[in-house]
Amino acid sequence: PIAYLVFQAMRSLYSWLSGDFTAGLQAAEEGIAFEKETGINVTYMGLRSHGAASALAMGKLDEARRLLDEITPFMVQGGYWLQALYHFIFSWLMLCKGDNNEARFHAENGFDKGLKCGHPLVFSGVHALVSIVHIELNKTAEAKKYLQQGLDYCRQYRTLQNEFLCLLTKARMALDENDPHTSIFLAEAFRLGRKWNYRYTFFWQPEVMARLCTEALRRDIEVDYVRSLIQAHHLVPDERPIHITNWPWPVRLYSFCGFQLVTGGEPVTFGRKAQQRSLSLLKYLLAKGGETVSARHIQYALWPDADGDAATNAYYTALHRLRKLLKNDRALIHSNGRLSFNHHLVWTDLECFSRCLDDINKLCRGEVSSSIETSYSLLDELMAIYKGPFLPNEDAPWAISMRERLRSRFFTALHELGDSFKKSGDHESALRCYRRGLDVDPAIESLYEKHIR
């Protein structure tokens, strides 16, 4: 029995540190159940600490708190390592809850017990944790001091996973301060992570990692490795990264100059007739903006000749098949009789088009600083997105009306950009803008007139 409990404690520790949190929590729960069955408690604190760590990493804060609370009455009976681990994980829990003062209390207690523990892995880890807590408390000087000490311990004792954590923290601080060396620090951190295939690190904060991964992709740093971290941990940044071309969107939808669905990075081919209604549902949702579209309106548009029950059944059948086609159950949100894309998982060129038009409008109205480079960049972005008519092979009324609306907005934006070039005295750039519009549709007379002038 003792060997089994030790095995489960080590299994839960290994699974947590290697990023398999489900297995880590499961091992802890199996060990705890066996403890209760046999009355043998030799791994009492270890099982609960490791289980709490895996629960935290999975975002199960209440489960982590429950396991830590079971340890609290007996915490002083453990050795320095177990006491330090308890305080580390409690501090981490408080960081996740936004209680920075309580996080500091546990970090400082863990720091004291960790130094008494005497293990090199703990030395570097406690310094990293205290540094992170000071960052949250806006005590930058203290954070830098502890972080440098942690890095020194990492390199002295070659505790590489903690070095990965310290380098990520260094990059985070550089990003906060708009340090010109941010790219160097990001590259150093993610290069080490990729070399040793680290899928996880101590004191993981999803919002911090989402931000660092976003910046790494924006700067083309260790792209494949960073994308794998985003996918493995379902990282979601505060601002949707629709302009980051290499973000690993589970679903991508292209609608200009043809329709294309890409799932998991692979284009989807369509063949079976049964898929056509599912595709019509997808296209209709796309045309309506992909947000809180009434199921009743969808049924009227796609099954106009069906009675109420038949239309409803056809709708739910198509929706079920569409979920399978997208290969992601969370890509669509159906709630209160309305259907939406999950915008954390679904990218559409239509949304990029709208954002680009908004940026052009702000530029031409003087709401943002203007430059030739910015104008050219927006022109190139607009042309890259609008490759041709919206869903050109769809002849349904809802598709035709949207197609004409988007076409009108596209040429209005070209007029605005061209006129802004003319106002600044850059007639050559204005001509270039009008010509690019004529390349898309040579029949636009207003562009011809501006081109001749």
Image (spheres, helix red, strand yellow):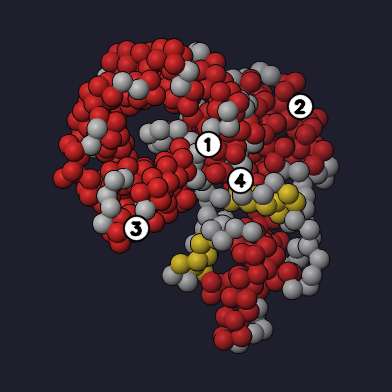
Label 3 to label 2: alpha-carbon separation? 78 Å
Label 4 to label 1: alpha-carbon separation? 19 Å
Which amino acid type is shown beneath numbered disc 2? Leu
Query: Which marked residue is nearer to the observer: mark 1 or mark 2?
Result: 1
Q: N-terminal of the two: label 3 or label 4? A: 3
Query: Which marked residue is nearer to the observer: mark 1 or mark 3?
Result: 3
Q: Are marks 4 and 1 in contact (CB under 8 Å)?
A: no
Instruction: Please state the horizontal and vertical placement of residue 102, each as a whole percent of the image.
Output: 20, 35
Label 3 to label 4: alpha-carbon separation? 42 Å
Q: Secondary structure at mark 2?
A: helix
Q: Secondary structure at mark 1?
A: loop
Position of the C terminus, as image quadrant, is: top right
Residue in the image at 35% along x and 13% along y:
149
Query: Which marked residue is nearer to the observer: mark 3 or mark 4?
Result: 3
Disc marking residue 34: 3
Label 1 to label 2: alpha-carbon separation? 51 Å
Residue in the image at 49% along x and 45% along y:
20
Q: Which residue is mark 1?
A: 199
- Classify 285 as above or below 21: below
Q: N-terminal of the two: label 1 or label 2? A: 1
Which amino acid type is shown beneath numbered disc 4? Trp
Which amino acid type is shown beneath numbered disc 1? Arg
Residue in the image at 47% along x and 71% along y:
337
Q: Which residue is mark 4?
A: 249
Which amino acid type is shown beneath numbered disc 3? Phe
Please state which of residues 393 and 128 is positioned toward the viewer in this rendering.
Answer: 128
Disc marking residue 403: none
Q: N-terminal of the two: label 3 or label 2? A: 3
Q: Which residue is mark 2?
A: 431
Please state which of residues 188 and 325 is positioned toward the viewer in this rendering.
Answer: 188
Crowding at dot 2, Cα within 10 Å, few <14 / some 14-19 / many 20+, comes out as many
